[in-house]
Image: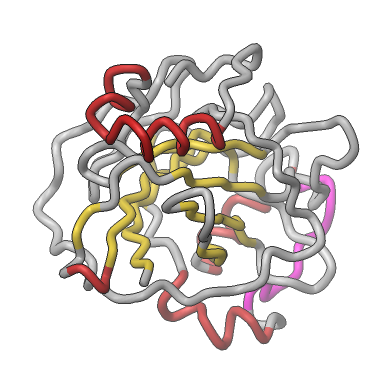
């Protein structure tokens, strides 16, 4: 799917097309980026390319822990992979694979995935601003990828990335990803994060992290001057 900031493709239109014409027709009209589990590449100005998988075991096919969307969700409906809008921060690429656990862990094609999170200062886009928000549509293997930055901390909560999976126009699954605390401390020592003094333990002060961190923390690895992580989202 074309992903520049002028793209106004509707997520709802894409899901309607998938429902009426099928995933094959969708793929012909929308060639979205796909992340591969365990692959790593530096976020770039072009669409992420699938990379060779490394020899790591596939994640267990389990239901992802659901969580509330919080007060900052906006139904932006903007299909794009690069959601940074030029904001400063440590680059981060998120490769997702969506599977249907109730159907033998079948990869879910043509599902819309929304992500949104805070900037390096801990602020969300509101009003007419759209930074660090976007949607991608999964390919035939259930994959999609986002280019963003590591989110900043705020309000006593563990830093996180929110996401919603829309298998169709009638249902959704909502949750959030966390980051390893040692990675956060390294990131927050860099600019522009270092303009604020980071908490000594940015995760442990959050009860949501203590409840779900074991299953929803991203296993990020360094890549270039940033990081990259892959995760399999299991929905019912």
Up-down relation of residue 131 to residue 232 (above or below): above
Residue 86 image point, x, y percent: 68, 22
Magenta stretch, residue numbers: 194-203
Q: Quadrant of residue 209?
A: bottom right
Residue 53 image point, x, y percent: 15, 43
Q: Is residue 6 left or right of residue 155?
A: left
* Residue sitting at x 60%, y 36%: 134
Residue pushed farthest left? Answer: 55
Q: Quadrant of residue 210?
A: bottom right
> Which of 170/206 is in front?
170
Magenta: predominant secondary structure element? loop
Q: Is residue 194 left or right of residue 44?
A: right
Residue 30 image point, x, y percent: 37, 21
Up-down relation of residue 178 to residue 32 (above or below): below
How is this picture coloured? secondary structure
- Screen quadrant of the C terminus: bottom left
* Residue 201 is covered by the magenta coloring: yes
What is the number of callouts on the image?
0
Q: Quadrant of residue 228?
A: top left
* Residue sitting at x 38%, y 40%: 19
């Amino acid at each position: 799917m074309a992903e520049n900031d002028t793209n106004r493709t509707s997520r709802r239109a894409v899901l309607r097309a998938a429902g009426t014409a099928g995933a094959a027709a969708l793929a012909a009209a929308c060639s979205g980026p796909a992340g591969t589990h365990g692959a790593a590449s530096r976020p770039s100005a072009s669409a992420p390319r699938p990379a060779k998988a490394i020899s790591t075991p596939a994640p267990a096919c389990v239901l992802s822990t659901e969580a509330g969307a919080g007060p900052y969700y906006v139904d932006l409906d903007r299909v794009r992979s690069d959601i940074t809008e030029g904001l400063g921060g440590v680059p981060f690429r998120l490769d997702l694979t969506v599977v249907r656990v109730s159907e033998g862990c079948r990869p879910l094609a043509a599902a819309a995935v929304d992500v949104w999170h805070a900037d390096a200062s801990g602020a969300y886009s509101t009003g007419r601003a759209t930074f660090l928000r976007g949607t991608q549509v999964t390919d035939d293997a259930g994959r999609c990828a986002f280019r963003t930055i590591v989110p900043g901390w705020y309000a006593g909560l563990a830093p996180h990335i929110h996401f919603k999976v829309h298998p169709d126009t009638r249902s959704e699954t909502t949750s959030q990803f966390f980051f390893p605390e040692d990675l956060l401390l390294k990131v927050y020592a860099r600019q522009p994060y270092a303009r604020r003094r980071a908490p000594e333990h940015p995760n442990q002060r959050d009860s949501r992290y203590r409840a779900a961190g074991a299953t929803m923390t991203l296993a990020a690895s360094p890549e270039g001057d940033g990081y990259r992580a892959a995760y399999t989202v299991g929905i019912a």
